[in-house]
Image: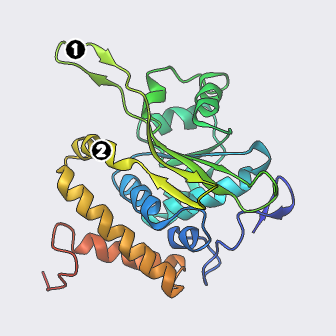
């Protein structure tokens, strides 16, 4: 697949044997690591939107990243198609009101993304912008602007809350992970917001932590084994749902 906005390869070797990118192919190609991919999987599976902020000249690459994540977790093709469709005002409204799984926006940071969505034609309110969900900021290396995109920052946008007196509380976004260029790896900070995510999805924080570790290990195992095809990843996720709530590795029939 090529980046239609630039006529060159989009995110690099993201494709599995089926020709379609997957969450595991993102791990295998270094776009994300297994730990961040596990968080993305968990959030998308929980119905929380996924937004990719990509360079304006690389929107096709950002779309491929989004399709890999949403398409792996949500097997209904219509959901993936809707997520990667160009965003307009109705689509932006659906995104923050739970009717759309994801979107790609030309922006270089979370703040640029918020500013863009607050302006016409989207005109989302400050309150609506708190429901953006998980935001992945993707960019190419400064010395290779046409190279493969990598997620350089991942955020969890905290939704509008109410205190005990009913007053609205707009909490700042939480950083889930950042790419450290000097160390050549991701730094993770999602542990600080796990209790909030768990409460939002009706789970216990300890269970979510264990769940994320299992997902990380499974994704890393597939990436190491070279099993990156969309079909393989969907089978993993379908199997994971079948044994939901049971000890990891417990394959007893239900």
Residue found 20% across the figure and 50% down from its top? 205
Dot 2: element = helix
Q: Nearer the viewer, residue 183 or 19?
A: 183
**Vertically, is 64 above or below 5?**
below
- For the C terminus, give its image quadrant: bottom left
Image position, residue 106 (x, y; %): 70, 40
Labels 2 and 1: the sequence-earlier one: 1
Image position, residue 218 (x, y; %): 37, 76
Whether residue 175 sits left or right of residue 185 in the image: it is left
Residue furthest front as drawn: 182
Give the residue number, with chain letter if any, for mark 1.
166
Q: Is residue 75 visible?
A: no
- Mark 2–mark 1 Cα distance, whole angstroms, equals 21 Å
Whether residue 246 sits left or right of residue 228 in the image: it is left
Give the residue number, with chain letter if any, for mark 2.
197
Q: Quadrant of residue 243?
A: bottom left
Residue found 51% across the figure and 20% down from its top? 125
10 Å neighbourhood of mark 2: few (<14), some, or many (≥20)?
Answer: many
Dot 1: element = loop
- For the N terminus, give its image quadrant: bottom right
Q: Quadrant of residue 181?
A: bottom right
**Vertically, is 19 above or below 83?**
below
Q: Which mark is residue 4?
A: none
Counting every numbered tag in the picture gives 2
Residue found 64% across the figure and 75% down from its top? 15
Q: Quadrant of residue 92?
A: top right
**Vertically, is 230 above or below 7?**
below
């Amino acid at each position: 697949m090529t980046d239609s906005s630039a006529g060159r390869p989009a995110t690099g070797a993201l494709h599995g044997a089926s020709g379609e990118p997957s969450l595991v192919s993102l791990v295998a190609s270094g776009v994300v690591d297994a730990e961040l991919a596990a968080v993305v999987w968990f959030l998308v599976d929980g119905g929380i939107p996924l937004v990719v902020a990509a360079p304006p000249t690389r929107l096709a690459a950002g779309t491929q990243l989004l399709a890999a994540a949403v398409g792996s977790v949500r097997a209904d093709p219509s959901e993936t198609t809707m997520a990667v469709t160009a965003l307009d005002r109705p689509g932006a409204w659906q995104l923050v009101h739970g009717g759309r799984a994801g979107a790609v926006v030309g922006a270089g940071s979370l703040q640029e993304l918020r500013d863009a969505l607050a302006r016409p034609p989207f005109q989302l309110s400050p309150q609506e912008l708190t429901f953006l969900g998980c935001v992945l900021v993707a960019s190419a290396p400064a010395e290779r602007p046409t190279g493969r995109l990598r997620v350089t920052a991942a955020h969890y946008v905290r939704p509008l809350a109410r205190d005990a007196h009913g007053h609205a509380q707009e909490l700042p976004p939480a950083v889930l992970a950042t790419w450290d260029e000097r160390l050549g790896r991701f730094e993770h900070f999602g542990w600080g917001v796990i209790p909030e995510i768990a409460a939002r999805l009706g789970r216990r924080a300890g269970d979510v932590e264990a769940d994320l570790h299992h997902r990380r290990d499974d994704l890393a195992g597939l990436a190491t084994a070279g099993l990156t095809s969309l079909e393989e990843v969907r089978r993993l996720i379908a199997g994971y749902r079948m044994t939901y709530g049971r000890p990891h590795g417990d394959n007893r029939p239900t």
